[in-house]
Amino acid sequence: MEHYKKIITDIYNEVKKVEDTGRTANFIPELAFVASNNFGVHISTIKKETFGIGDFQKKFSIQSIAKVLSLTLAYKLEGEQLWDRVDVEPSGNPFNSFLQLESDFGKPRNPFINSGAIVVCDILVSHLKNPKEDFLSFCGDLSNNKSLNYNEKVAESEKSCGSRNVALCNFIKSFGNIKNEVNTVLDFYFHICSLEMSCEEISKIFLFLADEHFTTQSQKSVITVPQAKRINAIMLTCGFYDESGEFAFRVGLPGKSGVGGGIVAVHPSKFCITVWSPKLNEKGNSYKGMLFLEHFTTKTASSIF
Ligand code: GLN
């Protein structure tokens, strides 16, 4: 960890000074109130060593990072049948795109674009008795963290401007690939996106994807080894929408971004690292987050390649 600490600190100080040309997400009004100069990093290793710097303990809206957690729970509950409802191909299109849905008969290209995540939410609504509560307790169990919660203001804010997601959900339903009420599915989707966590909490929660046995912090099995392989593979190929190739090229780790400015990256069998900086590039991914991780995997020679 000493080695990582020094490198993380140096890169942090260097990247902090870089002029950020990005913008905070403005299509969810509530997110625009977050101070854009927040910048935090936290790493957790599978040997349970940790290190954080900057705003690593401040909670923020994890947005699409939650899509990995919802996918994990749906995969556990639904098994391989899940892939009949959502594909595993990179879309090469923006996260909220309609393109491809029509020619693909309502089957989203992958679970991390909005259309795919909405189908995953529909699957969870079918399985869970109290979807919002049950999802929260699943996330809490992953890292023994009972302090997780949704931010109702962010969920409401997104709902008030969510026409695009409403349209996506209705469009998919017209093909029969949404089984529940559109309003119920979207209310659940907006809530999971509004989950609040700090960099520290995210890197601890996602450690199950790095751990050799894919267990929680209290050694409970989360998913099987082949299931973890698949989730990490989808993160690598689809975690950054139409910038997934660029992230693999520059950083070289499975990862997932959110429009709250967070990015989590996993090195299977080594560590999980989270960066938060709210200003986004034109593809909706944190500008400084990507820059930080690019330097980190380069200087520590710790990409998967
Ligand atoms: N809640 C956001 C949306 O549905 C999530 C997008 C993201 O983080 N990329 O548009």
Image (cartoon, rainbow, N blue to C red):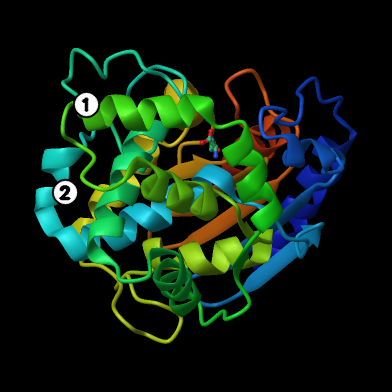
Residue 221 visible here: yes
Marks 1 and 2 close (CB-CB < 8 Å): no
163 versus 201 height, above or below: above
Quadrant for residue 304, please give it.
top left
At 57% from the left edge and 42% from the top edge, which residue is drawn? 297
Q: In this view, does 35 lie to the left or right of 174?
A: right
Image point 26% across, 29% down: which residue?
172
Left or right? Give the position of 112 relative to 59: left
Above or below for 74 versus 156 = below
Seen at 34% across and 76% down, the residue is 215
Quarter that holds the N terminus: bottom right
Secondary structure found at label 1: helix
Q: How many labels does the image show?
A: 2
Q: Earlier in the sequence, mark 1 or mark 2?
A: 2
Residue 108 in sight here: no
Q: Position of residue 207 (x, y in %)?
A: 46, 66
State the image coordinates of residue 22 (x, y, percent, origin top left): 75, 23
Residue 48 occupies which quadrant of the picture?
bottom right
Q: Name the residue under label 1.
A: 174
> Mark 2, residues whose alpha carbon is within 10 Å: few (<14), some, or many (≥20)?
some
Label 1 packing within 10 angstroms: few (<14), some (14-19), many (20+): few
Task: Determine the quadrant in which ligand 1 lies.
Answer: top right
- Element type at mark 2: helix
Q: Position of residue 51 (x, y in %)?
A: 70, 67
Q: Which mark is residue 279?
A: none
- Which disc number belongs to residue 82? 2
Q: Distance between the residues labelled 1 and 2?
A: 19 Å
Q: What residue type is labelled 2?
A: Leu
Q: In which quarter of the image is residue 42?
A: bottom right
- Residue at 20% over, 34% down: 87
User: Relative to the observer, which residue lies in front, 12 or 157?
Assistant: 157
Residue sitting nearer the eye, 268 or 6: 268
